[in-house]
Image (cartoon, rainbow, N blue to C red):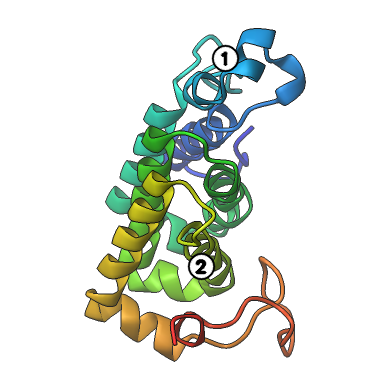
Amino acid sequence: PAPAQLPDPVKMFYSFVQDLCVMADYDASSLSSRYQVDAGERMRTGAREGYWLCTIKFPRPLCLDLLSTCVAAHPRIFTGTPECFSLLRHNLCATLLKNLKGCFDFAILIRSISLLQKLLQNQTLARLLMPELQVFMQIMLDLANADRSTWQRATSLEFLKSVCEDPQALVVLYEQGAPVGTMSRSPGGSPSGPRMFLDMTT
């Protein structure tokens, strides 16, 4: 449930985003054998109801589209409300991470990339989420490896090209590119973690 101290409109927004994160995820133990055999079907089909939208199952691509819309349309709610920023960092970023790492479907990957682009395009959010973005950048570079499928490589390279052509994204990545070792900030950082994006691309 949404924190009780939030104003009603923000509480509704919090509940909506939380439910989208839940429905964009899946529990492998609850899937039928049909979904286990067909990876594309598994990635497309909503398998879990939300808490607030308790009788609805949105398909995964729609959930990712709606999450992108929420981030693009209301970034100030995330940056100005600690509870919503915590939801963004711990729930939405975890959902995005799982969809990027375990993606077997083109429709899922392009929507995950769109959500990642929305985070990058807002400089305030990008600066606050730099540890998470460094991990996402490493995943996108890994998707461009020769052992990946053609569509994964093409999609990831197109995304990386768009980042390199975006001056604002490059400024944020350059200014905030301290090494990180985990998905959250820690005092002093960890040099053994993912390298800063500019190092990864040179």
The residue that label 1 is drawn on is 54
- The residue depicted at 33 percent of the width and 81 percent of the height is 170
Rendered view: 116 above or below 200: above
Mark 2 / mark 1, whichever is N-terminal: 1
Tag 2 near tag 1, CB within 8 Å: no
Q: Position of residue 201 (x, y in %)?
A: 44, 81
Rendered view: 148 above or below 132: above
Locate the N terminus and report the quarter of the image it occupies: top right
Which image quarter: residue 108? top left
Front-most of residues 74 and 108: 108
Q: Amino acid at mark 2?
A: Leu
Local secondary structure at mark 2: helix
**C-alpha gap between disc 2 and disc 1:** 31 Å
- The residue depicted at 41 percent of the width and 41 percent of the height is 67
Front-most of residues 9 and 25: 25
Q: Is residue 6 visible?
A: yes
The residue that label 2 is drawn on is 133
Front-most of residues 47 and 185: 47
Front-most of residues 36 and 131: 36
Q: Amino acid at mark 1?
A: Cys
